[in-house]
Structures are given as C-alpha cells and as structure tokens.
Image (cartoon, helix red, strand yellow):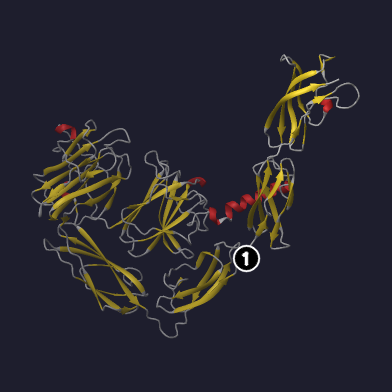
C-alpha cells in the first residue's frame, strides 16, 4: 500500500511539472506568444489561459502578490502609447474564467535584463487595464499575466497601440484638435471644466429643460477635408458605463464655440445592465435617427445615431459626457469616407545608406495647406546617440549600432492638432578588423525525456563592442542570453555585436533514451477465469516504478510488472511506468471475456435417504458467484421452499423435499432460481422439478 501511494505521488508530481503536453506554450518568458495585431485588437473570449502554467524564474512584479502560474506575450510597438486590457471573470460580458487577473509590462529580453514599465492587479472586477506612453516604435515589449493568489483560468487580451492627440479638455474652446481619424484612447474623464453650461442647449437631455447637464466631459474638434459620411464608436472601458455625446457644427472655426449648432444628440441611458442604452455608442451606418432622449423608454432607442454627412472646410466638435460619473475612460474608433484636415507629414534622410558610427541627417519636408506647422518632436529610435530632438531641424544623428531603426516625427499645427509619421531605415554594419567578438557556450540543459522540448542553451559574448545579440536562425536577433523550449537537435548559435561583428558556435543537445512499456497482446478468456499479464520495459535492466489501472477492481496486484487479473467482463488494463528522472511511458491491454454462463439444473431428485440425489439446487462453473434466490412451488402455486444467498453445487443447501418439516408426496413442482455471476449480472431460471421416492 505504501509503495502504491508513493508511486501515485510520483505520477502526480510528474503530470503537474514535467508533462509538457499539459502546459501552455507560453509558460516561459523564452516562448512568449507573439501578438501581431496591436491596433484596436481583441482576442476571442477565453482564447488564452494560464491553466497548466508554472512559475517563471523572474521575480514577482511590483504589484503582484506572488508568481504562481504566469504566462507571457510579446508585441512590437507601432505607435507611442498602448492600452492593454486583460478580461477574466467579470460580472458582465466576461472575457474568461480567470478571477483576479494581474499583469505587468516589460522592456528587455528574456534570458537577459527585463525592466518593468507598468504593473496592475485586479481589485475584484475581473478586469484590469495597463496604460503606458513613450514607447519606442519598432521595439519589442513583453506582457506577463497571472492570477492573484494562485488562481488560474481563461482570459481575453485587448491591445490598442496608438499615437495620442492632445490631452482632451472639458471645455469646448480648449478642445483637442484632431488631424486624422486614427483610433485612440481617453484614459479618464473627470469634471465638467470651467463652463458647466455648455450642454444646456442639447435638447435630447431631459427634453430640453434648462439645467446643467455637463458632468464628466471631453471635447474634440476638427475640420472636414474630404466631405462625406462620418461614423464612430465610443466604447467605455467600464462596459456598463453610460456615455452620452453631442456633435456640433462650429460656424466660427475650431477654437470658437459661439453659435454652435447641434447635429447629433445622444442621451440614452439606463440604470440597469445589460441594456440596449448602455455600453458602446456612436454613429453607425443603417441608423436614421439624429437624437435619442434621456432614459431608455422608446423602442427606437439603441444607443446609436445616423452617420454625420460632413461638408468640406466645416469645423465640428464632439463632446463625450460620462453621465454615470465613474471617471473611467473610453476608446474612439472612426469610420466613414470623410477625412479630417491635417498636415501632410514627411521627412527624408541623407545619405540614403549609412553605417553605424557615421552621421546621418534628417530633414523635415512636411506641409500643411490650411495652416502652419509650429511644433516638431523627433524620436530617432534605438541606439541613436541623441534619441530625441525638437524643432524643424535638420538634425544630424549617429547610430551606435547596426540594424533596423524606426524614426518618428510628431508635428503640431497652429490649429492645435498633432499628427504622427514613422519610417524605418536600415543602418549597415561597421565591424572593424581586430574587434575580436566571440560567442561562447556557458552551459546547457538537455531535454528531460525522449521527445521533450524542455532543453535550454545559455551563452554570452566577449570582446568586440557590447550590445550583443543572438539568434538560432541567423535572422531574428535578440539580447536574450538563453534559449529554451528545445528538442534534441544540432543548434548553431549566432552572435553579433553593436558594430555588426559576427561569430557562431555549434551545439548538440543529446536525446535521452526512449522509455517504453509493452503490456502484451490482447487476450480472450471465459467468464470467471483469470488471465496473466506479463509486461516488458525498455531500456532493459532500468529501474522503473509501475502502476496498473482499470475501470474495475479486478487486479491482485496493481504495482507488479506481471499481474493476474479476474475481469468481470471485457476490461482494459492500463500501465504507466516512471523512472527516477520522471520520464514515463504508457501502454494498455484488453482482456476480452466470453459471455458464457454454463448452469446445470436437474429435473428430478429423490430425497429417500439412500444418500444419492438427496437435495435440489443449481450447479455452475466459476462464472457463477452465488444463488441469490431459490423458490419451489406446488402445482397449486403454494410456496413450499425458499432460501437466499447460497453457494452453487451444494445440494445440502437446497430443497430437501420437505414442507413444514414433513415429506411431500411425489410429483411435479415448479422452481424459480436467480443466479448472480461474476460480471455482476443476475439471471433468472425457472422450470419443473420431479420429486421422486
């Protein structure tokens, strides 16, 4: 019993720690799931999970209670700001089953140094959101997700990587001016600004009764460049928030709100969720109404209004009012064929091709037909000796490393709007003789078991110019000094320093011996008979622990290599072997049982004292377990004998021809016999028995 208990413990540990098929693919920082779509994108509900994951070797982020079942994701920034939303088991529209999710955002490389940029943990809503600005376009970032206090489950990830407009204000004259229809996120909405009467002309609020309706507001303005329909969707971060909005035409321009004219007015709302008047709202194709009143009492109310048909050169304003006053933010996504006026951003560099440590000059060539550009903010990307600059330029830069670089220019017009442009350039290598860069293997871990992919390589660089990067495919280089998730194979580790000097080494990860078990060929036996199972293992003379399991309790030993079984019916026996390193193998054998139930019931007996054929009972093979019930009746239906739960083949336990202690007359009597067999089935037999003298 103790041996079996210890083996069960070993198997339990193995299943939970070493069986990679039960683990998620992104269990380790070495193998993050790459999220390629980062602009206003969401995974499907419950698409990701931390079930089956294990704790990483990296310490807990600043806001985590501990690290228990973390999983990793990666993305490459395409804009400067990002909002990451992890949705688990929420009360409304859950993204999965994970309770109390927590997440952290990192910059750096797995196997090297990673730096925490942002961290947040759930306070009981089942959903969290991280915001981070100032990202470098083209840089890869890491996301780490776990459940608080060892919780596991499924979850949804949403990413919105965007270039933000000016910080929106709560008064119309100070509105953020939009230059284009790029999607963006408003992090929070607090207060009504200095003028709290700006929405008093919005007749959809309380049917026009004069009062101050502006509560938590955000204003945006723009000028139409290409005429046509405008649509948009406002999605609150807190899905059950009530967002109201008004669209005005500004006849006096984007910074003059006098005489503003209402074009669309949305005041639908409810105090219950889910509701057709709560959550996402906006202008949508197919809608025909231009306003919806407060409340949610009309059948026509659905929280969306008809598209706005804009005219060229006309200024418009959008005010979003968070009526429920939770101060949480929202995302904005525009649609329609119309466009907003803004600068045409462009810049060039000279020379077209340049090596690291050589000068390259960036020159602005942006234009704005309807105004002036008054602000320039440059970001030159990784390893630029001056990473940022302001002013029109030109700006002369030196890159300290080779490879792709992403240069971003953010312009501000005299109208107050911002527009962003990012371009990629490639800096050639500048390796010099005598740099003497080398890659060396520090250590390695071979795959734990045959066919496993848990091998690891640890390496480093020496000499040359630090800022070492490594790759196993000679294409995708990172700063990671370790690679995991490897099978047995030949590997070539490529290294490069900041000047492009290269080196490589070859490494072979050996495959452990395969572990095999053979339970033998399937067998066929008659019901009630035993079968011998002789299992064999490989490698020979290797120390294994074995455990047999089946759906029936029919084994005489479940930890023996060779076992005897008494199957109650056709039964499959499964065996699992585990060696001292935790490697395992499985096999199974089926014992087919013929459903033969031979029973002999005599048709006459003579209880006359001669010692021969003195009692009446049933006779059977080992397939029969017992007689549940034996009854004998007279020709008139009178019960003359009854016994229960007796052995077969024992006439002395059956009917002796007496009734109430007196011998009955010879004649024909009727019997009913119910027999229980080793397959737990009961069979009823009935017939005539002749009582002879």
Q: Where is residue 562 in the image (x, y as percent from the top left)?
A: 74, 52
Against 212, is 155 above or below?
below
Against 676, is 49 above or below?
below
Q: Position of residue 368 (x, y in %)?
A: 14, 63
**Res. 278 image quadrant:** top left
Q: Note whether residue 28 is visible.
A: yes
Against 494, is 420 above or below?
above
Question: Considering depth in this image, is 377 or 335 the residue closer to the camera?
Answer: 335
Judge left or right: residue 46 versus residue 179.
Answer: right
Residue drawn at (82%, 29%) of the image: 650
Query: Could you tell me which secondary element the residue under label 1 belongs to?
Result: loop
Q: Position of residue 45 (x, y in %)?
A: 39, 47
Mark 1 = which residue?
A: 512
Question: Considering depth in this image, is 249 or 651 the residue closer to the camera?
Answer: 651
**Res. 73 image quadrant:** bottom left
Circle 1 Cα neighbour tier, 10 Å, few/some/many (<14 / 14–19 / ≥20): some
Q: Residue furthest right?
A: 610
Judge left or right: residue 45 versus residue 181.
Answer: right
Question: Considering depth in this image, is 591 or 432 the residue closer to the camera?
Answer: 591
Q: Note whether residue 54 is visible.
A: no
Residue drawn at (35%, 69%) of the image: 382
């Amino acid at each position: 019993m103790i041996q079996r208990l210890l083996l069960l413990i070993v198997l339990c540990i193995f299943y939970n720690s070493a069986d990679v098929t039960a683990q998620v693919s992104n269990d380790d920082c070495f193998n993050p799931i790459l999220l390629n779509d980062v602009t206003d994108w969401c995974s499907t509900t419950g698409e990701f999970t931390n079930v089956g994951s294990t704790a990483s070797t990296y310490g807990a982020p600043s806001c985590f209670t501990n690290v228990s079942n973390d999983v990793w994701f990666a993305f490459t920034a395409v804009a400067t700001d990002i909002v990451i939303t992890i949705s688990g088991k929420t009360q409304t529209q859950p993204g999965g089953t994970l309770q109390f999710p927590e997440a952290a955002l990192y910059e750096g490389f797995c196997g090297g140094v990673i730096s925490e940029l942002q961290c947040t943990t759930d306070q009981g809503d089942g959903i969290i959101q991280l915001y981070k600005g100032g990202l470098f376009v083209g840089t890869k970032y890491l996301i780490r997700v776990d459940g608080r206090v060892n919780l596991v489950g499924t979850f949804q990830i949403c990413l919105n990587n965007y270039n933000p407009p000016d910080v929106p204000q709560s008064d119309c004259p100070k509105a953020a001016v939009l230059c284009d229809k790029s999607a963006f996120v408003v992090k929070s909405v607090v207060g009504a600004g200095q003028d709290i009467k700006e929405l008093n002309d919005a007749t959809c609020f309380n049917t026009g009764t004069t009062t101050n309706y502006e509560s938590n507001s955000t204003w945006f303005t723009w000028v139409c460049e290409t005429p046509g329909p405008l649509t948009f969707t406002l999605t609150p971060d807190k899905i059950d928030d009530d967002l109201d909005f008004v669209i005005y035409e500004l006849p006096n321009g984007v910074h003059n709100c006098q005489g503003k004219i209402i074009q669309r007015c949305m005041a639908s709302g409810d105090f219950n969720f889910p509701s057709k008047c709560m959550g996402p709202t906006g202008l949508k194709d197919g809608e025909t109404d231009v306003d919806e009143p407060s409340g949610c009492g009309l059948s026509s109310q659905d929280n969306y209004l008809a598209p706005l048909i804009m005219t060229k050169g006309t200024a418009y304003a959008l005010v979003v009012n968070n009526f429920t006053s939770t101060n949480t933010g929202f995302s904005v996504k525009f649609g329609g064929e119309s466009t907003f006026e803004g600068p045409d951003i462009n810049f060039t560099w000279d020379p077209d091709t340049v090596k690291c440590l050589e000068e390259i000059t960036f020159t602005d060539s942006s234009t704005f037909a309807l105004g002036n550009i008054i602000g320039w903010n440059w970001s030159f990307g990784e390893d630029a000796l001056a990473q940022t600059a302001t002013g029109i330029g030109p700006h002369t830069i030196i890159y300290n490393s080779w490879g792709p670089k992403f240069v971003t220019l953010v312009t501000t017009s005299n109208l107050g709007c911002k527009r962003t442009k990012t371009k990629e350039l490639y800096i050639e290598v500048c390796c010099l003789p005598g740099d003497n860069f080398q890659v060396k293997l520090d250590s390695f871990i071979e795959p734990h078991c045959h066919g496993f992919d848990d091998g690891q390589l640890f390496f480093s660089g020496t000499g040359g110019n630090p800022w070492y990067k490594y790759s196993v495919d000679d294409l995708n280089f990172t700063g990671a000094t370790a690679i995991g998730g490897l099978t047995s194979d030949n590997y070539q580790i490529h290294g490069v320093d900041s000047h492009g000097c290269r080196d490589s080494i070859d490494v072979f990860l050996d495959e452990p011996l395969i572990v095999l078990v053979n339970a033998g060929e399937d067998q066929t036996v008659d019901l009630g008979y035993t079968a011998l199972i002789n299992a064999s293992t490989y490698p020979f003379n290797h120390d294994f622990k074995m455990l047999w399991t089946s759906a029936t309790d029919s084994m005489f030993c479940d930890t023996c290599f060779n076992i005897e079984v008494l199957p109650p019916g056709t039964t499959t026996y499964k065996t699992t072997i585990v060696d001292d390193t935790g490697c395992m193998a499985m096999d199974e054998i089926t014992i087919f049982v013929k459903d033969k139930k031979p029973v002999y019931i005599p048709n006459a007996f003579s209880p006359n004292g001669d010692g021969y054929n003195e009692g009446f009972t049933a006779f059977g093979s080992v397939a029969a377990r017992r007689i549940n019930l034996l009854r004998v009746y007279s020709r008139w239906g009178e019960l003359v004998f009854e016994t229960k739960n007796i052995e077969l083949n024992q006439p002395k336990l059956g009917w002796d021809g007496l009734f109430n202690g007196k011998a009955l007359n010879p004649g024909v009597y009727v019997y009913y016999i119910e027999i229980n067999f080793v397959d737990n089935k009961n069979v009823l037999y009935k017939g005539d028995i002749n009582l002879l003298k």
